C-alpha cells in the first residue's frame, strides 16, 4: 500500500464534467489527497449545487483517496441531496468505499448553533454579574488572607520561613539593580528638568527641596510599587496560576493545607518586608542622581545635602515607607488572588497575569489617592 | 506491508552525559502497528522523541521513508515532519482553540484547501475518532479520553503515513481504551497508516500490536522483539515473560 504523501508527477487530481441523460456526471481522477482536493474542490462543489435531477460521480480513475478526498465525495453528495437530486458514486476502489460508507452528509453540517448572540440587556447583566462575582471573590479572599495572617501571627512557627526568604530574595534583593537604575535616572532627569526653569529665578538650590520631598513622599513608593507589580505581582500570578492549572492547588487543599497560608502569606509578608527597603534605595539613588546634576551646575555637595536635610522630616520618610508597605501588600495579594482564580489552560494563565498587573497598578493609584487625603486631613 | 518505512540504526541517546539507550537497531514496516514497550523509566518516550526529531541523538541515525531525520535541516526537515503525526501523553491540544480549530490548524497552514473543505475534513476526522458533535468544545471541556482521541484527530489532519502515539491509553478506562484500540486497528487497515505506539498497557498491546520491541533500563537496549503473544509464550528472557505475565519483581 503506497501511502506516501508526495504525489508522483502526472498524477494530480483532475475533474471533468459532462451532462448526462438526466443530470450531471462528474469524473474525478488522480490522487485525491489534500493537495489534489484543494485544486478541484471549488469547481466540483459549484457544479454539484445545480446537478439537475441526478448527480453521478465517476471515481474509477482515482488512484489514491484519503480523508480529504472522502470529504469531497461526501460534500458532493450533500450538495446533490440539498438540491434534491439523486446521488450515485461509481467506480471507487473497494478499500475507499468502505471508509466512504462510514460517513453521512450530515457529518459535514455544522450542528445548529445553540449559542445565540445575547441581547444588549443580557450582555449588560452578564458583565455586571461577572463584576459582582469578582468583587465577591475578592472580599472573600481578603477575609481568608486576613484570617491566615492572624493565624500566622498567633503561630509564627507554622509560617514557611524558608519559602518567604526565597521570595524575599527573588522579589526583593534581585530587584535592586532595576530599582537603583530607574531611581537614579528619575532623580537625574527631574533635577535637570526643574533646574532649567528655576535657574531663571536664581533658585536652582531648591531643586534639592523638590527632589527630596517628591521622592520620599510620593515617587519612591509609587514607582517602586509599579515595578513590583510588573516584576513580582505578575510572577506570582503566573506561578500560582500554573499551579492551579496543574492541580497543585487541589493537591494542597486535599492535604489539608490552606493555599492562602501556604502560598500567599509567605509571598505577601516577604514582599512587605522588602519593598520599604527597595523604596529607600530608590529614593537614595534618585537623590544621588539629583546631586550629580547640582554638582555639574557648580553647587558643592554639602549645600545640596544641607538643603535636603532641611527640607524633609523623619515623618516624610516614614509616611512614604508606610505607603510603600501598603502598596506592596495590595500588589502581591492581588497577584496571588488572580493566580488562585485561574481556570482552564495556558491562555487563562496569561489572562491572570495581565489582570494581576492591571489591577495592581489600579490599586496603587487609588490607594495613593486615599493616602493623600488621609495625610492632608491629619496634617502630616 | 513489508516495505521498511522507518529505519533506526545504531541509535544512542541520553540526556547530557547519561546514556539512556545505546546502539538501537530496528525497522518499522509500512502499514504495521509497532509498539515500543518496557517498564516505567526505561526510555520509551525518550526513544519516541528522538525518532520524531525533537531531540538530537548522541549517535546513530533515523530514516523516515528513506529520508535522514537526524541531519535534515530547513525545508527538508519540514517535509519529513509533515509525513507523520504525533500525539503527546497529555494530548497537547491548544487550549485556546476549539476541537474543530485544533484539527483545522495544520490544514490551514499546510494545504490550500478552501475553508469549507478544511472544516469538512476536520469534521470527518473528528467523527472517525468518535467525537462528532463536540467540534465547538474547548479542550478543557473534555474528559481525558476525549482529549486523547481529539489529539489523534489532529495528528491525522494531514493524512500522514505514520502516526506516533505516546502512551495513548494511559489513564483511560477499559471501555474507552478498547475504543481507542479499535480506532487504531480501523485506521491501520482502512487507511494503511503505520503506527508507532509507546505503551505499557498489556491488554491493548495484545489487541493492536503486530510487532513489539521491549526496552530494558539495565541492558540499555532492546531485549526482545516479535509478536506479543509469541514473546509471552516463548521468550527465554525471564524479564520479558515477567512483563507479559504481569508478575511482580521477584526479590533478589
Image (cartoon, grey):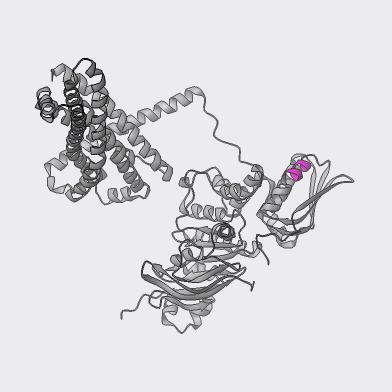
- The quarter in which the C terminus of chain B is drawn is bottom left
Q: Establish if B241 lies above or below A106.
A: below
Q: Is residue A268 toward the left or the right of residue A87 in the image?
A: left
Residue A84 in which image quadrant: top right
Q: Quick one: B106 or A339, which is closer to the camera?
A: B106
Magenta portion: prevailing SS class: helix
Q: Quick one: A208 or B20, which is closer to the camera?
A: A208
Residue A243 position within the rendered picture, expressed as x and y whole percent measured from the top left: 33, 48
Residue A310 position within the rendered picture, expressed as x and y whole percent measured from the top left: 9, 23
Residue B138 position within the rendered picture, expressed as x and y whole percent measured from the top left: 49, 44
- The quarter in which the N terminus of chain B is drawn is bottom right
Q: Quick one: B94 or B6, which is closer to the camera?
A: B6
Q: Which residues are magenta?
A: A42-50
Q: Is residue B134 visible in this depiction of the protein? A: no
Residue found at x 56% / y 50%: B131
Say whether residue B84 is magenta.
no
Q: Residue furthest bottom?
A: B236
Q: Establish if B98 lies above or below A305.
A: below
Residue A211 in which image quadrant: top left
Q: Establish if A346 lies above or below A91.
A: above
Q: Is residue A236 toward the left or the right of residue B164 in the image?
A: left
Q: How many marks?
A: 0
Q: Residue furthest top?
A: A201
Q: Is residue A32 toward the left or the right of residue A228 in the image?
A: right
Residue B23 position within the rendered picture, expressed as x and y whole percent measured from the top left: 46, 76
Amino acid at each position: 500500500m503506497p501511502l506516501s504523501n508526495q504525489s508522483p508527477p502526472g498524477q494530480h487530481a483532475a475533474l471533468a464534467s459532462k451532462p448526462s441523460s438526466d443530470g450531471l456526471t462528474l469524473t474525478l481522477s488522480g490522487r485525491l489527497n489534500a493537495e489534489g482536493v484543494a485544486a478541484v474542490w471549488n469547481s466540483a462543489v459549484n457544479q454539484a449545487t445545480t446537478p439537475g435531477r441526478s448527480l453521478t460521480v465517476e471515481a474509477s480513475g482515482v488512484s489514491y483517496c484519503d480523508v480529504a478526498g472522502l470529504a469531497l465525495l461526501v460534500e458532493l453528495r450533500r450538495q446533490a441531496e440539498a438540491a434534491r437530486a439523486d446521488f450515485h458514486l461509481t467506480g471507487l476502489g473497494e478499500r475507499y468505499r468502505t471508509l466512504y460508507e462510514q460517513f453521512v452528509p450530515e457529518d459535514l453540517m455544522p450542528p445548529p448553533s445553540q449559542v445565540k448572540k445575547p441581547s444588549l440587556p443580557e450582555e449588560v447583566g452578564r458583565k455586571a454579574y461577572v463584576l459582582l462575582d469578582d468583587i465577591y471573590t475578592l472580599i472573600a479572599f481578603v477575609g481568608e488572607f486576613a484570617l491566615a495572617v492572624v493565624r500566622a501571627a498567633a503561630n509564627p512557627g507554622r509560617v514557611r520561613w524558608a519559602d518567604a526568604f526565597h521570595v524575599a530574595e527573588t522579589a526583593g534583593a534581585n530587584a535592586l539593580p532595576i530599582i537603583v537604575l530607574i531611581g537614579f535616572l528619575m532623580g537625574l532627569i527631574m533635577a535637570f528638568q526643574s533646574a532649567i526653569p528655576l535657574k531663571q529665578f536664581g533658585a536652582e538650590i531648591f531643586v534639592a527641596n523638590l527632589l527630596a520631598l517628591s521622592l520620599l513622599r510620593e515617587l519612591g513608593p509609587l514607582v517602586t510599587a509599579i515595578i513590583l507589580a510588573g516584576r513580582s505581582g505578575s510572577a506570582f500570578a503566573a506561578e500560582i496560576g500554573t499551579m492551579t492549572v496543574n492541580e497543585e492547588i487541589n493537591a494542597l487543599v486535599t492535604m489539608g493545607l490552606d493555599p492562602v497560608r501556604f502560598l500567599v502569606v509567605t509571598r505577601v509578608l516577604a514582599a512587605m518586608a522588602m519593598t520599604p527597603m527597595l523604596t529607600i534605595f530608590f529614593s537614595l539613588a534618585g537623590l544621588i542622581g539629583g546631586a550629580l546634576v547640582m554638582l555639574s551646575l557648580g553647587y558643592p555637595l554639602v549645600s545640596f545635602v544641607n538643603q535636603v536635610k532641611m527640607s524633609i522630616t523623619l515623618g516624610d520618610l516614614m509616611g512614604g515607607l508606610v505607603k510603600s508597605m501598603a502598596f506592596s501588600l495590595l500588589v502581591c495579594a492581588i497577584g496571588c488572588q488572580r493566580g488562585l482564580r485561574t481556570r482552564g489552560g495556558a491562555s487563562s494563565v496569561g489572562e491572570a497575569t495581565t489582570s494581576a498587573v492591571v489591577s495592581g497598578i489600579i490599586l496603587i493609584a487609588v490607594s495613593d489617592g486615599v493616602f493623600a487625603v488621609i495625610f492632608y486631613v491629619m496634617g502630616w | 506491508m513489508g516495505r521498511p518505512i522507518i529505519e533506526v540504526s545504531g541509535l544512542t541517546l541520553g540526556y547530557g552525559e547519561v546514556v539512556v539507550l545505546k546502539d538501537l537497531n530496528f525497522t518499522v514496516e509500512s502499514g504495521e502497528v509497532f509498539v515500543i514497550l518496557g517498564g516505567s523509566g526505561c526510555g520509551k518516550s525518550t526513544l519516541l522523541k528522538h525518532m520524531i526529531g525533537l531531540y538530537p541523538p548522541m549517535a546513530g541515525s533515523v530514516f523516515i521513508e528513506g529520508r535522514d531525520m537526524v541531519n535534515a535541516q530547513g525545508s527538508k526537515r519540514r517535509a519529513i515532519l509533515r509525513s507523520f503525526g504525533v500525539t503527546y501523553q497529555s494530548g497537547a491540544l491548544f487550549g485556546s482553540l476549539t476541537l474543530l480549530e485544533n484539527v483545522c490548524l495544520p490544514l490551514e497552514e499546510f494545504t490550500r484547501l478552501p475553508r469549507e473543505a478544511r472544516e469538512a475534513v476536520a469534521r470527518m476526522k473528528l467523527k472517525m475518532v468518535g467525537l462528532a458533535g463536540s467540534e465547538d468544545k474547548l479542550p478543557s471541556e473534555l474528559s481525558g479520553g476525549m482529549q486523547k482521541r481529539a489529539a489523534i484527530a489532529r495528528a491525522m489532519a494531514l493524512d500522514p503515513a505514520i502516526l506516533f502515539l505516546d502512551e495513548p491509553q494511559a489513564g483511560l478506562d477499559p471501555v474507552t481504551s478498547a475504543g481507542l484500540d479499535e480506532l487504531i486497528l480501523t485506521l491501520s487497515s482502512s487507511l494503511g497508516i503505520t503506527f508507532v505506539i509507546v505503551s505499557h498497557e498489556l491488554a491493548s498491546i495484545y489487541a493492536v500490536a503486530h510487532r513489539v520491541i521491549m526496552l530494558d533500563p539495565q541492558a540499555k537496549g532492546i531485549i526482545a522483539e516479535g509478536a506479543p503473544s509469541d514473546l509471552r509464550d516463548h521468550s527465554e528472557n525471564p524479564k520479558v515473560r515477567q512483563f507479559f505475565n504481569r508478575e511482580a519483581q521477584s526479590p533478589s
